[in-house]
């Protein structure tokens, strides 16, 4: 009923930048939160950044000052601008959204690989 489609991952050198996008589509009545999680090999999935309703973005301490999360509610799209990337940012990045169809549900994108390496 709801699809989250991500784009923008890839390979970048340390200090470089990438921009991720995630568009939600389907039988959407409302979206409460949209944001990004990541999972590195051997580690648990962790919150990177999200925006709840029309509030300010929330960030993990490890990305504050380097990443910017923004949301276009008219397009049901969330973005993650990642600057000053570090090797420890390497992970699969997943888009997440809490969406009201007939009931509230928690939805995930398929994931996009971000690799920071020289």
Image (cartoon, rainbow, N blue to C red):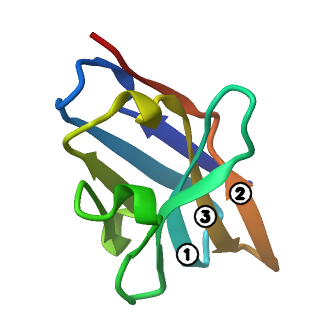
Task: Name the one closer to the observer, 30 or 93.
Answer: 93
> Where is mark 1, residue-wise?
33
Residue 107 appears left or right of 9: right
Secondary structure at badge 1 equals strand
Separation (CA) of disc 3 from disc 1: 5 Å
x then y, percent, for residue 51: 44, 75
Residue 53 appears left or right of 77: right
Residue 64's tag is none
Sort mark 1 into few (<14), some (14-19) or many (20+) by Cα contacts within 10 Å.
Answer: some
Q: First in sequence: mark 1 or mark 2?
A: 1
Q: Residue at x 33, y 71 (%)?
A: 74
Task: Name the one closer to the observer, 23 or 68.
Answer: 68
> Where is mark 3, residue-wise?
97
Sort mark 2 into few (<14), some (14-19) or many (20+) by Cα contacts within 10 Å.
Answer: some
* 60, above or below 91, in the image: below
x then y, percent, for residue 25: 54, 54
x then y, percent, for residue 52: 50, 82
x then y, percent, for residue 89: 43, 36
* 38, above or below 96, in the image: above
Secondary structure at badge 3 equals strand
């Amino acid at each position: 009923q709801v699809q989250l489609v991500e784009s923008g991952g890839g390979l970048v050198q340390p200090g470089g930048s990438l921009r991720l996008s995630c568009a939600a589509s389907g039988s959407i009545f409302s979206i409460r939160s949209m944001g990004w999680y990541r999972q590195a090999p051997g580690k648990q999935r962790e919150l990177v950044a999200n925006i709840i309703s029309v509030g300010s973005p929330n960030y993990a301490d490890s990305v504050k000052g380097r990443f910017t999360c923004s949301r276009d509610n008219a397009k049901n799209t969330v973005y993650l601008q990642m600057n000053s990337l570090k090797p420890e940012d390497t992970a699969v990045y997943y888009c997440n959204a809490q969406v009201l169809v007939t009931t509230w549900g928690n939805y995930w994108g398929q994931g996009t690989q971000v690799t920071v390496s020289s």
